[in-house]
Image (cartoon, coloured by chain):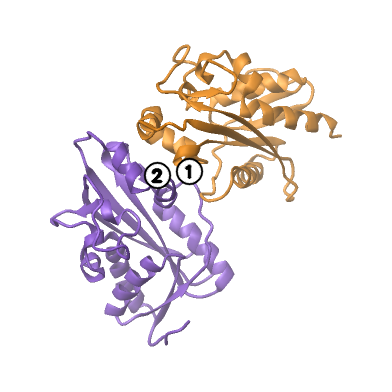
Chain colours: A orange, B purple
Amino acid sequence: MSFKLKGKVVFFATGNIHKFNEARAVLTQHGLSAGMLRAKTVEIQSGSLTEIAVASAQDAYKRCHLPLIVEDAGLFIDALKGFPGPYAAYVYKTLGNKGLLKLLENVQDRKATFRSAIAYCDSETDEIICFLGEVSGTITPEERARDSESAFGFDPIFQPEASSRTFAEMTLQEKNGVSHRARALHKFAEWYLKQA
Amino acid sequence: MSFKLKGKVVFFATGNIHKFNEARAVLTQHGLSAGMLRAKTVEIQSGSLTEIAVASAQDAYKRCHLPLIVEDAGLFIDALKGFPGPYAAYVYKTLGNKGLLKLLENVQDRKATFRSAIAYCDSETDEIICFLGEVSGTITPEERARDSESAFGFDPIFQPEASSRTFAEMTLQEKNGVSHRARALHKFAEWYLKQA
């Protein structure tokens, strides 16, 4: 790691630097240091976000033996029966935002929910704890982003409730004020600080 | 099971009666008896069809201790960067054929490939053997089926090369003459008959 870890530390197993930066900002608010662990995690295909996060955390722990969190996030669009759900990463890679917008052409109901499951693991036992966060919103008619840096994933087409901007039009701090990921991370951090 | 198993037997772990009926017809041609095993199999999320089939077969064997095959199939649409790929079942449940047709509206390139991976397992060791079959074709402009019974999965929108009919317009025998699944099963059956 190229930065110093101070105080209580947790590692975030992810290959996504955007997710890591968001998580670090939240954890820092709680006085926690975060390290990025570029572990490729096994993902089970069927199952809820929680099941996927738990299985991935167990798998990552087996290989790293460090106290770590893994996140599984999903975007659930009401009019598409929850699609893309937990398959957000694959669908982003193939259909992208343009594909989702095409699927919603002439569709009135634009409601969607972003959900995040954070699983924490620090031993080989089955003691894994999971924290959930979610945010409701709508799918916008077109992509809107502040700049290319902020336009990651489905952020340019998701507008959280009570906001006139998409996730991609917000600063990292603004997004962390309302996002599913930040909500799950706050729950984790509060719990983690109480542990011995 | 409500039918008698004669000769050499193999079990097909699947919850899909259509798949089982197709498989039984192919295996019968080789003099093999097939039993349907309604085992819910664990599916890993990332990975090729082969990896998914192998992991599912190992998992099913652990619970049943019977010589068995598991199939993982996928539909890979060129213009959608391979989507839905191995996530065919989930995408069928959420977007359905209408969703795929909407994604391909005004798209010239309709090329697609159906792929099947059949994994066989008969012990707790890691000796798993896998057989692949595939068929090229196109995505039709609209759904076409013989009847509701034949219209399962993406069959009503997939027309194999050198045919003017979709999979769902064919009889089971006709479909087995060209399908990805039948091709993989023939390979399996030929190998299986040579085993002691």
Q: Which residue is mark 1?
A: A81
Q: Is residue B57 left or right of residue B176?
A: right
Classify 10 Å Cα crowding around label 2: few (below 14), some (14-19), many (20 and above): many
Residue A140 lies left or right of residue B150; in this view the side is right
* Numbered disc 2: secondary structure: loop
How far is mark 1 from mark 2, CA to CA? 8 Å
- For badge 1, the amino acid type reads Lys
Residue furthest right as drawn: A196
Chain of residue at mark 1: A
Q: Quadrant location of the C terminus of chain A?
A: top right
The part of the image, by quadrant, that contains residue A121 is: top right
Q: In percent of the image, x 78 and y 26: which residue is there?
A: A8
Q: Which quarter shows the N terminus of chain A?
A: top right
**Residue position for label 2:** B95
From the top left corner, tell me how far across and down residue A184 is, in percent.
68, 31
Q: Is residue A1 visible?
A: no
For image coordinates 53% across by 15% down, the residue present is: A164
State the SS at label 1: loop
Which residue appears at 74% of the width and 27% of the height? A9
Seen in the picture, residue B174 relative to A45 is either above or below; the reply is: below
Q: Position of residue A161 (x, y in %)?
A: 58, 23
Looking at the image, is B139 positioned above or below residue B188?
A: above
A112 or A126: nearer the viewer? A112
Which label number is shown at residue A47? none
